Image (cartoon, rainbow, N blue to C red):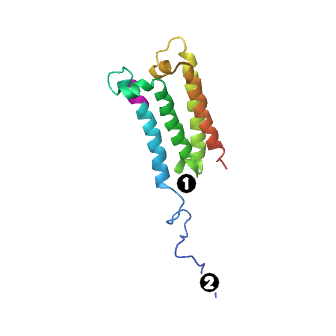
């Protein structure tokens, strides 16, 4: 008499389809929120607070606003590299890794191409710190590379 395979009540026969699939919605939302918050921080500084008339506390920080904004973006991308998020597993790791490497490379190339002209607003405001931003994106790419299987 052939017996059917026994499955537990808590585990589904389809991999990843059960309640315990390992995907953390909270971690994914926090990662996305950190990236968006970093972008919004720099956009508010560049468009509202940089002139010093409104949001004077933010205007007083000066170039430190770029550090805060990019730190939030890099932290959000690093949090997204965890295996419990979509970017931290399977093809997402490759997408995150190559995406960060390419963004960093393009950032540095745009800086060098527009070096004397300085027509791109954010590139103009950062000056030599554009190299730090490009290398920072590449460093986050290495965080993804350590999770690649």
- 10 Å neighbourhood of mark 2: few (<14), some, or many (≥20)? few
Q: Which of the two residues, 82 or 86, is positioned nearer the viewer here?
A: 82
Q: Position of residue 46 (x, y in %)?
A: 40, 24
Q: Which residues are magenta?
A: 42-46
| Horizontal and vertical percent position of residue 81 | 57, 46
- From this viewpoint, which residue is outermost toward the left? 54
Circle number at residue 14: none
149 vs 40: above or below: below
The rendered magenta stretch, by its main secondary structure, is classed as: helix
Residue 76, placed above or below residue 84: above
Q: Secondary structure at mark 1?
A: loop
How many angstroms separate mark 2 from mark 1 (CA)? Answer: 35 Å
- Residue that lies at the very extreme toward the top in this rendered image: 116
Q: Nearer the viewer, residue 112 or 43?
A: 43
Q: Which label sits in the foreground, 2 or 1?
A: 1
Cβ atoms under marks 2 and 1 closer than 8 Å = no
Q: Judge by depth and name the residue closer to the eye, 40 or 68.
A: 68
Q: Is residue 107 above or below residue 73?
A: above
* Residue 72 higher or lower than 11, as above or below: above
Residue at the disc numbered 2: 3
Residue 45 located within the stretch drawn in magenta: yes
Where, by quadrant of the figure, is residue 143 drawn?
A: top right
Q: Position of residue 131 (x, y in %)?
A: 59, 24
Label 1: which residue? 84
Q: Inspect the magenta stretch and tell me whether residue 125 lies in it.
A: no
Mark 2 or mark 1: name the one nearer the start of the chain: 2
The local secondary structure at tag 2 comes to loop
Q: Position of residue 36 (x, y in %)?
A: 43, 39
Residues packed near mark 1 inside 10 Å, few (<14), some (14 to 19) or many (20 plus): some
Quarter holding the N terminus is bottom right
Q: Is residue 69 left or right of residue 135?
A: left
**Residue under the point 46% across and 15% down:** 119
């Amino acid at each position: 008499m052939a017996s059917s395979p026994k499955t537990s009540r808590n585990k589904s026969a389809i991999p990843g389809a059960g309640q315990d699939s390992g995907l953390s919605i909270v971690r994914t939302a926090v990662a996305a929120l950190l990236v968006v918050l970093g972008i919004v921080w720099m956009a508010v500084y560049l468009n509202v607070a940089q002139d010093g008339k409104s949001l004077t506390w933010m205007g007083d920080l000066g170039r430190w606003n770029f550090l805060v904004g990019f730190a939030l973006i890099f932290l959000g991308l690093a949090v997204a590299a965890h295996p419990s998020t979509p970017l931290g597993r399977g093809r997402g790791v490759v997408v995150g890794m190559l995406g960060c490497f390419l963004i960093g490379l393009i950032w540095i190339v745009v800086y060098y191409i527009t070096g004397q002209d300085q027509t791109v607003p954010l590139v103009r405001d950062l000056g030599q710190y554009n190299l730090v931003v490009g290398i920072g994106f590449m460093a986050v790419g290495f965080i993804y590379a350590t999770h690649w299987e």
